[in-house]
Amino acid sequence: MKNCLSIKHNLDFFVSPNLNNSYLASRTDVSKNDMENGFCWYALPPTTIGDSIILFNLCYYRNKLMEIHASATGDKYGTSWDDWSEDKEKLCIKDTLTALQNEGYSEGIQAWGSIYGIYDTKAASGYVKIKLSS
């Protein structure tokens, strides 16, 4: 178990509490969704962690990183609603947790926050929520 969150992205930066949102906003390969209420989400391009391709969505509140949603991506998780299944979403959660665990980040409470697999039945999607301590 690591005592701080710092995950290397293929684009030569680290996903960590020190990642400045103005740096992300300046990148053309990062999508920004400003909620106009103090919250702003940034969708990063896919990155490779071990054998998995992972998508990270970072949530900032008033310029402070608060939480991260991570999810494995690839054909085995479905490519459209036509081949969607709850089992594939749960596999996505499992594979994302495994990729993070292989980097030293286990599910549960950490010194710096927490990591949990989430299956949202209303959204019909699965992801891993990384919540940072305030």
Image: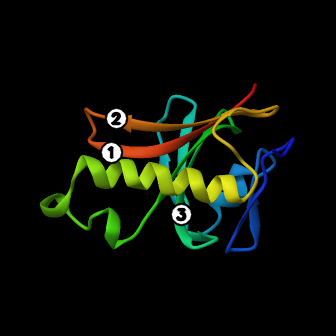
Q: Residue at x 72, y 48 (%)?
A: 105
Q: Residue at x 32, y 72 (%)?
A: 75
Q: Amino acid at mark 3?
A: Ile
Q: Amino acid at mark 2?
A: Asp
Q: Residue at x 34, y 35 (%)?
A: 120
Which class describes the residues within 10 Å of circle 3: few (<14), some (14-19), or many (20+)? many
C-alpha separation, residue under disc 1 versus residue under disc 2: 5 Å
**Nearest to N terminus: mark 1 or mark 2:** 2
**Residue 46 placement (x, y as % from top left):** 53, 69
* Mark carried by residue 120: 2
C-alpha separation, residue under disc 1 versus residue under disc 3: 15 Å
Residue 32 drawn above or below residue 39: below
Q: Secondary structure at mark 3?
A: strand
Residue at mark 1: 125
Residue 19 drawn above or below residue 133: below
Q: Is residue 94 left or right of residue 74?
A: right
